[in-house]
Amino acid sequence: MTSTDLADAFVSTKEALSDAGIEDEFFLDLLASRLLVERVGESNNQGWWDSRVLSETGRTRLEEVTPKTQLQSRISLASKVGRKAESDRLPADAISLFSFGPQVESRLSAAIEDIEPADTQSLEALENISVQSLSEGWTDRIIEQTGSNITAASTTLTDPGTGDSFRIEEEGYTQSEVEPEKWRLLVTLLQGYGHSTDRLCVPYYPLKSELKSESA
């Protein structure tokens, strides 16, 4: 599967989320990004985590348990898997693709809870993803499909090295600084995931305390 195919799956996922009732443009991009990366990393693809929640098998199992709310359940479970994998590799106070800080996450959770229960909500484009290998920069075409108006070419990341995570910037952001910078943060974190090819290397920013920032 090519990066173009992945970008098409990203667009289809955004459309499915919009049809399900997610209206905020940033939340559409953030959720679609998380779900795509989660699917790429599932055990029958890159094997970054032990999960198949976004595969056809995962949908079938959830439909048996929560037929009306299986979409909400898949989104929540997929997000938990990605968040756990990141937290195992990151310091406690970090901004990452699966964790944008309490304020953003609280609003996002409320939006997910508001998804209307239905019988026919599908993430078929994600289920059809089959990725056995990735090329450097595989997220660049996905970034082009976001509403950020920021391209991968306009941002430059340092070499992530050989560790299992890398800090994008030394300074980081407070909660109040995340909101006005959220699009740039999302794009840069996606670009960081584009360095994960044969292994998972999680990009992140430090999450600074508001109190420390004010005292400084």
Image (spheres, rainbow, N blue to C red):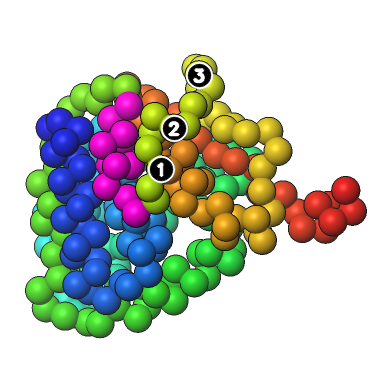
Q: Is residue 145 magenta?
A: yes
Q: Earlier in the sequence, mark 1 or mark 3?
A: 1
Q: Give the class, few, some or many, for how many residues have Cα within 10 Å of label 3's Cα (few <14, many ≥20).
A: few
Seen at 88% across and 48% down, the residue is: 216
- Residue 150, numbered label: 1
**Which marked residue is nearer to the observer: mark 3 or mark 2?**
2
Whether residue 86 is situated above or below residue 115 in the rendered picture: above
The residues colored magenta run 137-147
Location of residue 153 (image quadrant): top left
Q: Position of residue 47 (x, y in %)?
A: 28, 34
What's the residue at 21%, 24% (across, down)? Answer: 133
Residue for point 55% across, 39% down: 204
Query: Could you tell me the amino acid type at mark 2?
Result: Ser
Quick check: can you spot residue 92?
Answer: no
Q: Earlier in the sequence, mark 3 or mark 2?
A: 2
| Residue behind mark 3 | 159
User: Which label was assigned to residue 154?
Assistant: 2
